[in-house]
Image: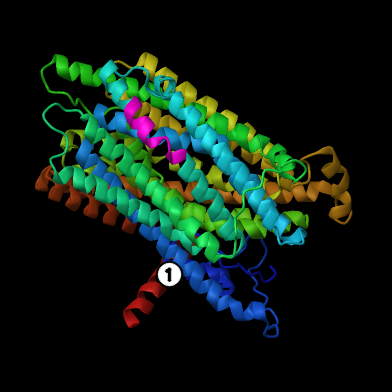
Amino acid sequence: MEHFEIPGVTGDWDTGMLRLVADPQKVSDLIPPRRGPVQGPAVWRPREEPAQTADAEREPRASRASAGMAVATLVSRISGMFGQLLQAAALGSSVLATTFTVGDTVPNMIYFLLIGGALNAVFVPQLVAAAQRDPDGGAAYIDRLLTLVFCALLVVTAVAMAAAPWIVAAAAGELRPNERALAVSLTRYCLPQILFYGVFATVGQVLGARGRFGPTAWAPVVNNVVVIAVFAGFIAVGGVGASGTLSGPQSLFLGMGTTTGVAVQAVIVLWFLRQAGVRFRPRFDWRGAGLGAAGSLAKWTLAYMLVGQAVNVLVMHLASGVDARAAAAAVGQGHGHAGDAVGYAAYSRAQQVWILPQSVITVSLLTLLLPRMSRAAAEDDRQAVREDLSFGLRMSAAVIVPCAFAFLALGPQIAAVLFGYGHTGPGQAHSIGLMLAAFGLGLIPFSAQYVVLRGFYAFGDTRTPFTVGLITGAANAAVAVTAALTLGGTRWPVVVMAAGYGLSSAAGLAWSVRRLRRRLSGQGSAAESAAAPERTGGRGRGAASDRAVAAGRGVARLYRRLVAAAAVAALVGYSAAQDVDRMAGDAPAGSLLATVAGSGVLLGVYILSAKALRVTEVDVLTRHVRKRIATLAGH
């Protein structure tokens, strides 16, 4: 394998791990020894030391910037989760929380559906190309892009605010009239977030194209601080009263308070835009500026977002209906207004915990690998793309698989520790834990599919991910509708929806793996097939296909071993947590002790089982963690 370099980039990674993988020599230590016909002996070829250049002198500064952004991301994750915990304590996790969650989630969904996907997938590369192509360094293109996006955001926000009752009816139509009216009010207070999210994302990408990543990394932290202050203040002045709902001033305070956080986030990046030397002047001469071509490139990405958001709206509609029926049953039985945490708010809270390992591990790793994969794909070096995908799947799985089994085994205990306070009592926290356990194992195919889809993106293929989204969305929707129609009571339908969300990724993963194997073996199209013999030096595409199959079998074999090790560990960890639960009781302190004991036993058994099964990846990770701890202890 040739020596490679990874530039300093943003990533959801802790500082130590980011520095570890940002050093090429340390990356070589993490890559497992190559075995079999695809991966030969592990060899690292030291590079020749280049002469000192301006780029070389900037490397330490880029590394420090990357580490700083990793710290910002970690702080953002922690502060965001703390805000969610306060929200659960303030509003509970039943129908009242669902009305707020609907209002706060709809703007995000509309933004990503109509604008967000196009910004990230198409316009950002166009910004970079314009900066390199245009004599003015892309200044005119930036003015036109910002003007176009800002105008589109204003129109979308205005239309959405006018259509708020119909949007809420589509997303949560089964809420009772008073709850639906509250949801409409909260949605209108939150819909300006569409504008502010778009401003933040667009300006942030312009800053990124000019090498300014810090503001976009730290601005969400300020947003989270505002949200924390809003809900802390709400709790301090008394919170939800005996009526079990929000008054007009309370809904205004919470809705506009959360919107203020997003607005502050946008203002921060706008201020730094001038510091980066961009003097924005509105320009409406969009015709012939290349924006139309960029828009046509976004069609498959927008279609992919449409499928995903349509399924999300369906799940929101069905889950909020379960919440409404639970609340009505609670009132009918004289148990108050809240009911159990069985609907969309509980589903959303469990999902936010479940997605954390994916965000911190898989997304970070692929953020580092995707530029290399894209360069290799541009050079038609399919073997290099295959090696990077294999590395991404192996190293992420070593962490993702035990996390998935930990959620399955310890979901109720984890939820009790995180959410069992204030208006989210022990019963509601237990329901969230059941959903977290249901989500659990789906994290494995969900994470693997994320890695595999980056293989298509490396080749500039956005149509195949759309097809994968159709398969995954159809499976998810089928599970959600079946659960809502066939399961009686109010506890289990949304639990099954949670299981369907992650496990539906398995259907998309199976299809995408077969397609990617064909792509990597040169069978992706007629043109590729015709050119394959020339690229492989006369050996034809048969040898490439054999290598792709062998690589896939090696990764599948690793996943089977990891699942076996994690399953054994989960059984032992579950038993330990149950034993501690029986001794310590259901109080928050008891749940904390059970979580610590269960997770500690699970981790220890997993490492030992993986070692017994000769899983190199786990051994490599644990060795580097021990080195990092020893280094920190030495300081």
Q: Is residue 229 left or right of residue 157?
A: left
Q: Is residue 97 visible?
A: yes
Pinpoint residue 248: horizontal percent, then vertical percent.
23, 30
Q: Is residue 466 above or below residue 460?
A: above
**Amino acid of disc 1:** Gly
Pinpoint residue 399: horizontal percent, then vertical percent.
43, 54
Residue assigned mark 1: 16
At x 28%, y 39%, the residue is 254
The quadrant holding residue 511 is top right
Pinpoint residue 410: horizontal percent, then vertical percent.
28, 44
Q: Is residue 615 visible?
A: no
Q: Nearer the viewer, residue 170 or 464?
A: 170
Q: Is residue 2 left or right of residue 437?
A: right
At x 57%, y 39%, the residue is 151
Q: Is residue 574 above or below residue 438?
A: below
Q: Is residue 398 above or below residue 237?
A: below
Q: Which region of the structure is painted magenta?
A: 184-194
The answer to if 188 sits in the magenta stretch is yes
Tag count:
1
Q: What is the secondary structure assignment of the residue under circle 1? A: helix
Q: Nearer the viewer, residue 550 or 366?
A: 366
The answer to if 174 sits in the magenta stretch is no
